[in-house]
Amino acid sequence: MKAILVVLLAVFLTYGLSNGGEADAQEAPCPQVAHSKVGQSPVGQSAQAPNAASANCENKKIPVREETVVVTGTFAPVPVQDIDRSISVIEAREYPLLYTYGVDYLQRDPSIDLQERAPGGVQADLTIRGSTFEQTLVLLNGLRMNDVQASHHNLDLPLPASALERIEVLPGAGSIFYGSDAVGGTVNFITGAPQYTEAQVGAAIGNFGSNQETLSTGFVASRMDEQLNVARDFSTGFMPDRDYRSLTIFSNTGAQTALGRSLIMLGLGDKPFGANQFYGPYDSWERTKSWFAGLKQHLGNKTEFDFGYRRHTDEFTLLRDDPSVYENNHIDQSWQGAARRTEQLGQNSSLFYGGEGSYDSVHSNNLGDHWRTHSAGYIDYDVRALRRFSFSVGAREEVFDTNGAQFIPSMTGGLWLKPGWKLKASVGRAFRLPTYTDLYYSDPDHLPNPNLLPETAWSFEGGLLWDQGRRYRAEVTVLDRRERNEIDYVRPLSPPNAPYQAENIGRLNFTGVEASFEVRLQGQRIDVAYTGLYGAQSLPSGFQYEYVSNYPSNDAVVRWQGKLPGNFVARSRIGVVKRYGRDPYALWDASIGHEFKNVSAHLALSNLTNTGYQEIVGVAMPGRSIVFGMDVFVRGRKR
C-alpha cells in the first residue's frame, strides 16, 4: 500500500505541475469568491486567492456571491461545495435566539446520533453513521477534545452555546487529518470573533425547576478582538436523582500581529449531576470539571502552529446516598502540538505537510496511573481545476509508544458534470486507540482488558451534489465502512447478570445512504434529510453486546426556520428515529423569539408530543418541557 501511494503521489504531482498553467490559460467562468460568515477567513488559515479570472470578473462588475468556507476535512479553507467529501455546516449565528444549548444544533443532522443521558448536554454520547460513541472525534477550533479516560466525556466542553459561530460535521474516516478516533466521523465546534463591541446578560426559567443565566461581552478593535461567554444552568430534575447544575466559561481572543493572526482560547467547565440509571440500576452521582487552553498562531500565509492543553476530572459515586460503597476519582490530562505548512506548486496544485505530537495521562484510584505519547507526520497533494475537477491523495504515519504505528492513506476526487452538478468520491483508512477505561476500568458490572488492540476501519463513499447557490441544494451519498477489532463490552447470556468484559470483537460492516434537500427563500429555510444504515455483523453467538448495536437504522429530520410577521423568528423540527432492534419514536421541538431595541425574548418547547423514549437503553429522558428567557444587551462598534 505504501509503495502504491508513493507512485500515485508522483504521478499526480507531475500532472499538477505540468498542467498548472494550461488549465488557467483556458477561459474560466467567474469564480464565486469564498467568504466566511463574519467576513474574514477562519483564524490561522487563509482562503484561496482568486486567480486571473477573478480580475476579469471584477472588470465586468459581476456581483460576487458570499459562500461558506469550511476548514474541516481539508488542509486549507475551501468553499463547502468544493469539498470532495460529504460535509455539513451548521450555522450557530443564524437566529441564535432559537437555540438554548449547543447540542441542540447537532439534532439538525440525521447522520449524527446524539445519545443523551440528560437534557442540555449534561452528558451525551455522540455517534455518526452507526459508529460507537468512542469512534467519533470532537474538535474545538481544530484541536482535539476527546477524553482519554472515557469517551462518555467527549462532549464535556467548557463552551457556552453563545460562543459558537458554527459546527462542521465530517462523516466518515478523518484519521488522515486528525489521527485516532475519527472512524465514524468528526465534529468541529468553531468559535468566532465578536460581531460587535457589546455586553449582554440573560435569564430563563422553565419546568423541572430549571433556570439559566448567561453573560456575554465582546470587544472589537482594528487589530484585536475579545469574546467572553459565561453560562449557568440548573434543574431539580424531571425524576429523582436527575438534578444538575452546570457552569461554563469560555474566552476567545484574536489578534493580528507582525507574526500573523493569533487565536488564544481559555475554557472552564463544572458539572455536578444526578446519574440515576446512567451506567446501571443505581442511583448514582457524578461531577466533572474541565479546563482548556489553546493557541493557534499563523506565520505568514504558509505556516501555522497549534497548541492545546486539556485537563478533565471525573468524580463518580455509585450510590449517591452511600458514597463509601463505591467511588471513583479520575484525573486526565492531554497536551497537543502541531506544525503545518502549505506550498503552492502551481496555479492549481498544492502540497500540504506537517507534524504533530501529543501526550496524555491518567491518574485514578480505579484505573491506576498511566501515560502514553503519539507522534505523526502527514503529506497531502491536492489539485483543483476551477469548476472542472479536483483530487487529492495523502498519507499519515502515526507512531505510539504503546501500540506500534498506524499508516493512514486517503484519496478523494470530484468532477463537475456541469454548473451546479458534481460527482464526488473518497476512500480512507481510520483507527482508534483504546481509552484508559477500555483498558483498565472495573466495577461490579464491568471488567477491564489491558491487551486490547486498536480498532481499524476502511471507509468508502460516493455522492452526487446539486447546488444552486444559496437557494436550492440537494445531495445523495452512498457509504460503506468496514471495521476490524471493534471494541465493546461483552458478556455471556448464561449465567445471567455476569459482568461485561472489554473485548476486540468480530468484523462489522455498515452500508448506508444519506440524502438531503435544502431550500432558502426570502428569509425562510426548509431542510429535509434522511440517513439509512444496514449493519452486517460477524459476531459470536451466545453473547450480549453493550454498545455496538445501539445505532439508528433509520433517522429522518424535517426542519423549518425563518422570519414571521412582526419581526419574529421561529423554528420547528420533527425528527423520527428507528434504532436497530427497537421501536421508532418521533420528537417535535419548536421555538420562537423576538429582538427589540435592547431586549430580546425567546420561548423554547421540547418534546411537544410528550413522547416517552430512551436514547440509551435503561435511561429515561424527560417529557414535554418549556423554557422562557429574556436578554438585555448594549451594542457599540461593529466589526
Image (spheres, helix red, strand yellow):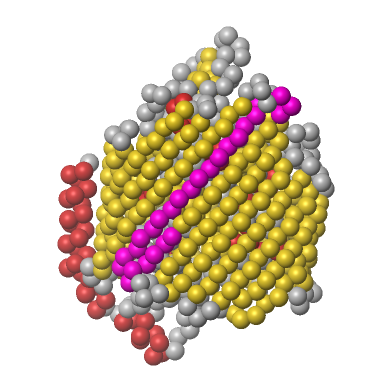
Does residue 468 appear in the picture of this structure? no
In the picture provided, is 464 more to the left or to the right than 591? left
Please identify the quarter of the rendering in which residue 604 is found: bottom right
Residue range corresponding to the magenta coloring: 295-322
Q: Position of residue 544 (x, y in %)?
A: 55, 20
Determine the residue positioned at 37% across, 32% down. 454
Image quadrant where one finds the N terminus: top left
In the picture provided, is 359 more to the left or to the right than 108? left
The one nearer the camera, 480 or 193, is 193
Please identify the quarter of the rendering in which residue 383 is found: bottom left
The one nearer the camera, 622 or 319, is 319
Q: Position of residue 355 (x, y in %)?
A: 29, 53
Q: Is residue 485 above or below residue 594?
A: above
Determine the residue positioned at 26% across, 62% down. 351
Any magenta on residue 312? yes
Q: Position of residue 17 (x, y in %)?
A: 19, 67
